[in-house]
């Protein structure tokens, strides 16, 4: 579990070093428009969502997770030099698509591998640990990028070359640091996405998928946290530190709450997580001062720590072992599309009714999800 966690940490450092600077690089260095930036990011994330389903199903069919995860991490690492040498936005688009294909390939098999390796009694702690270390990488990557930009006088390409190193280290660590459980002898291969296999996932699993989607509708893109921070009067140069603060809280809380989920009723913990999200939305809706915004962002991070590893644990618990890859792929796909819808709606509300109404709407969706928890699957 620790090795898988550090693999995620290293790859997140590599990816966030680039992603935290990429919009500025495309606009300032390559002369891209904001529309082009949005199109590239939208195409990239949509690609990752679709690939996740097929990679998860393929890992179930093969009975092997590690090989696909290694391939996905390797593809992500090998795209990093393309960003460093990119002369046009077309090359950046190709690099982003390949990078997100890598993320899609590795995501569901890696989560299924965590579930395969972790004893059921500590599965929540295992997912919490991996998520916590992954989020530490999301904190360290932007900080390292900012430090190198200051040191090298805003040399984007030099920073992108440095990002190759942790990416390759992640691949090496996964390849030689993790042993995959052997496939059971005599197990028959079947297509995991055939109708009869999807039926085997059962009502409890689909209830988790539905709750996860409503959770995501309630928790739209974190880009709106950055916009709210900018409105509060925080200096533009310091606004990215708001996301660093959120990820620090997220990283610090994910593992303890993962441990707690092994000893506590999952529905109760999900309900508490929703109450924290409602509190975060209300604070962000009311707050105009930077200290209030920071408090809301911290509550948001606690909510993430309480719920993200827990939802992954619930997917693992409700899906048959031989269909876990498919289960995680479908869960990620549905949640990803819910995030897309939520972010579009949040943007419309922001433009037409203001920031406060956007966060009040998030609180309302959270309350809806809380009501959904009252119905037993």
Image (spheres, grey):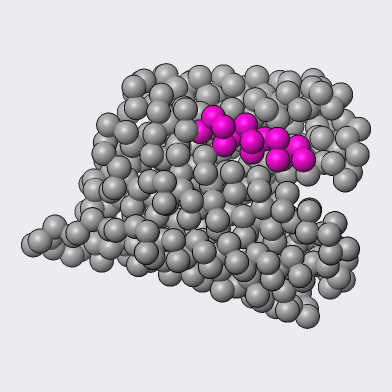
Quadrant of image for the C terminus:
top left
Q: Which residues are magenta?
A: 241-254
Q: Report the side of 365 relative to 371 (left or right).
A: right
Q: Report the side of 223 relative to 314 (left or right).
A: right
The image position of residue 307, as x and y in percent, is 49, 31
User: In the figure, residue 42 lies in which quadrant?
Assistant: bottom right
Q: Is residue 345 above or below residue 22?
A: above
**Circle count:** 0
Direction front: furthest residue: 151
> Chief secondary structure of the magenta span?
helix
The image position of residue 337, as x and y in percent, is 55, 50
Q: In front here: 173 or 181? A: 173
Direction left: furthest residue: 186
Q: Report the side of 144 relative to 119 (left or right).
A: right
Q: Report the side of 198 relative to 214 (left or right).
A: left
User: In the figure, residue 179 lies in which quadrant?
Assistant: bottom left
**Residue 330 in sight here:** no
Residue at point 77% right, 71% down?
157
Q: In front here: 199 or 54? A: 54
**Residue 243 in sight here:** yes
The image position of residue 339, as x and y in percent, is 59, 45
User: In the figure, residue 77 lies in which quadrant?
Assistant: bottom right
Residue at point 57% right, 43% down?
135
Q: In front here: 59 or 338? A: 59
As for residue 367 lying within the magenta part, the answer is: no
Residue at point 56% right, 32% down?
252
Q: Is residue 358 above or below residue 269?
A: below
The image position of residue 107, as x and y in percent, is 45, 56
Residue at point 44% right, 22% down?
269
């Amino acid at each position: 579990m620790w090795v898988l966690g550090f693999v995620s940490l290293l790859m997140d450092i590599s990816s966030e070093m680039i992603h935290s600077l990429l919009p500025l690089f495309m606009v300032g260095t390559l002369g891209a428009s904001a529309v082009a930036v949005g199109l590239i990011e939208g195409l990239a994330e949509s690609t990752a969502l679709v690939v996740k389903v097929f990679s998860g199903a393929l890992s179930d069919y093969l009975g092997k997770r590690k090989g696909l995860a290694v391939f996905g991490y390797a593809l992500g690492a090998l795209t990093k030099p393309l960003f460093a040498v990119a002369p046009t936005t077309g090359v950046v688009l190709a690099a982003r698509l390949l990078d997100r294909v890598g993320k899609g390939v590795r995501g569901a098999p890696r989560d299924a591998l965590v579930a395969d390796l972790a004893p059921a009694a500590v599965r929540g702690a295992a997912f919490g640990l991996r998520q916590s270390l992954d989020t530490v990488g999301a904190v360290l990557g932007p900080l390292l990028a900012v430090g190198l930009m200051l040191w090298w006088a805003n040399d984007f390409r030099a920073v992108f070359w440095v990002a190759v190193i942790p990416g390759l280290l992640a691949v090496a660590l996964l390849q030689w640091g993790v042993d995959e459980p052997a496939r059971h002898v005599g197990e028959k291969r079947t297509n995991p996405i055939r109708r009869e296999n999807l039926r085997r996932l059962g009502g409890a699993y689909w209830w988790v998928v539905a709750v996860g989607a409503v959770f995501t509708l309630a928790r739209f893109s974190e880009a709106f946290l950055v916009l709210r921070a900018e409105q509060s009067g925080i200096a533009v140069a310091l606004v990215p530190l708001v996301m660093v603060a959120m990820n620090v809280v997220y990283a610090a809380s994910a593992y303890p709450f993962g441990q707690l989920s092994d000893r506590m009723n999952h529905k109760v913990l999900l309900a508490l997580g929703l109450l924290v999200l409602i509190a975060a939305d209300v604070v962000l809706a009311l707050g105009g001062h930077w200290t209030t915004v920071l408090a809301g962002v911290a509550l948001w991070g606690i909510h993430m720590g309480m719920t993200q590893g827990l939802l992954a644990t619930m997917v693992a618990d409700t899906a048959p072992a031989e269909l876990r890859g498919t289960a995680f792929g479908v869960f990620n796909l549905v949640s990803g599309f819910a995030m897309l819808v939520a972010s579009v709606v949040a943007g419309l509300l922001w433009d037409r009714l203001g920031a406060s109404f956007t966060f009040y709407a998030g609180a309302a969706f959270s309350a809806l999800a809380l009501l959904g928890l009252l119905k037993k699957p």
